[in-house]
Image: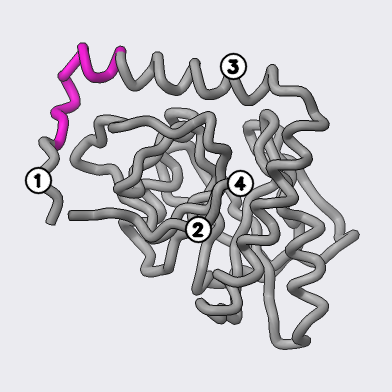
Amino acid sequence: MSSQRKLLPDDTEAQARRTAMRKRALAARETTPIERRAVWEAAIMNHLDSLIAQLAPRVLAFCWPYRAEADCREWVERWLGKDTNHIAALPVVVEQNAPLIFRRWQPRMKMAFDIHDIPFPEHGEEVMPDVALVPLTAFDARGYRLGYGGGYFDRTLAAMRMVTVGIGFELGRENDVLPQAHDRAMHWLVTEAGVFPAARS
């Protein structure tokens, strides 16, 4: 169990620091030239090959790219083509303060848009992922992450059992993202620099 102090919701100084980390990481990512991000993204996908082969999920969840995140769609299409038993899924926001659900995704299927204008499968069947690729905005070596502040993945991971793989760029790495009591750490981190098991101790 981590010895890191878990923050209380009214810890306003820590919340301000988390907000600053999130803004800094987003700004750095969104202002990085597309060509440089493409190189990083290619490295991430190469690293994913070995890790996902090791984890061997049947149902793999991923996220539609948002705000200059690493784009996993082509990689997932290739993964689907390797085995007809493979199933890919996208998260769906049902309501703002509820866990996500996951619907089966296939290339070129009809998509709808959630309350944040992010595409999701309009008629895909609901599935339970074995492994989820979770976007990282800012993150630390223990596997804790900052997303966009909505808490969707933390609520989801508290309600579901799955292996989580954080996907992000090294420019979002922090010494400590000051996790709160409800935050859930990733099991693995994948960046352009490699594959890292979360250092939870």
Q: Is residue 44 magenta?
A: no
Q: Residues in magenta? A: 6-16
Q: Are marks 3 and 4 in contact (CB under 8 Å)?
A: no
The one nearer the camera, 58 or 173, is 173
| Residue found at x 64% / y 50% | 63
Residue type, mark 3 in image: Ala
Q: Residues within 10 Å of mark 2 (few under 14, many from 20)?
A: some
Residue type, mark 2 in image: Val
The one nearer the camera, 192 or 98, is 192
Q: Which mark is residue 130?
A: none
Q: Residue beneath label 1, please? A: 3
The one nearer the camera, 199 or 112, is 199
The mark tally for this picture is 4
| Residue found at x 68% / y 68% | 88
Q: Residues within 10 Å of mark 3 (few under 14, many from 20)?
A: some
Q: Which mark is residue 195?
A: 2
Q: Is residue 17 left or right of residue 134?
A: left
Q: Quadrant of the N terminus?
A: bottom left
Q: Is residue 52 left or right of residue 179?
A: right
Looking at the picture, how far across and down is residue 104, in whole percent?
69, 67
